[in-house]
Amino acid sequence: MQRLAVAVVLLMLLSALPASASQSSTAPKRIIGYYTSWSIYGRNYQVHAIPAAKLTHVNYAFANIFKGKCAVGDSEADLKKFYDGDTRQTLRGNFNQFKKLKEQYPHLKLVPRNRARGSRSRASICSSRGSIPASTRR
């Protein structure tokens, strides 16, 4: 049942953003997925299962804003969880999994989402700088 719920949510989130009439012929289509850091727990939906070949962007929930800077939202999921091939000296957790996913799909962009609601300036903090590793953002 949980896998079905994840699949339904993922399918809903794999929709393309509508382009405005003035951009329809020039702007590339964006296909955006949504992945939550806590998906690795009860749902057991891992980063490597994201259909990256079909996406242009992944919104990653959640990052936190702390003293005007972007910070990890769930340090266990983001940085500490061990996967095959991880060592104590390497980046681990979801961030390392996204780094590996980007090596395989370089077109994919990771966009950290923050917990604050209704603030574009706060969202841009997490998208452009902070503690989210640059290799996973661009």
Image: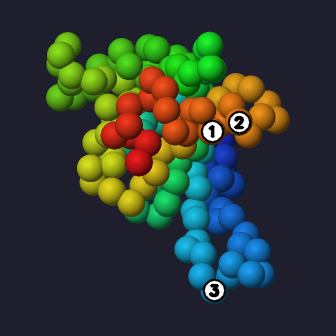
- Amino acid under label 1? Ser
Residue at image position (46%, 51%) is: 109
Question: Which residue is at the far right?
Answer: 118
Inspect this view and state whether residue 42 appears.
Answer: no
Q: Check residue 124 in the rendering and tell me which mark sits there, or answer none.
A: 1
Q: Quadrant of residue 119?
A: top right
Q: Secondary structure at mark 2?
A: helix
Crowding near pointer 1: few (<14 within 10 Å), some, many (20+)? some
State which tag comes first along the sequence, 1 or 3.
3
Q: Secondary structure at mark 3?
A: loop
Residue at image position (74%, 26%) is: 116
Label 2 – label 3 distance at C-alpha: 29 Å
Left or right: 32 in relation to 48:
right
Left or right: 92 in relation to 6:
left
State which tag comes first along the sequence, 2 or 3.
3
Horizontal and vertical percent for residue 112?
55, 36
* Quadrant of image for the N terminus: top right
Label 1 – label 3 distance at C-alpha: 27 Å
Q: Check residue 33 in the rendering and tell me which mark sits there, or answer none.
A: none
Crowding near pointer 2: few (<14 within 10 Å), some, many (20+)? few
Q: Which residue lies under the disc numbered 3?
A: 25
Q: Check residue 121 in the rendering and tell me which mark sits there, or answer none.
A: 2
In front of the other: 70 or 13: 70
Label 1 – label 2 distance at C-alpha: 5 Å
Residues at circles 1 and 2 in contact by the CB criterion of under 8 Å: yes
Crowding near pointer 3: few (<14 within 10 Å), some, many (20+)? few
In front of the other: 12 or 108: 108
- Amino acid under label 3? Ser
Question: Which residue is at the far bottom?
Answer: 25
Residue at image position (57%, 51%) is: 33
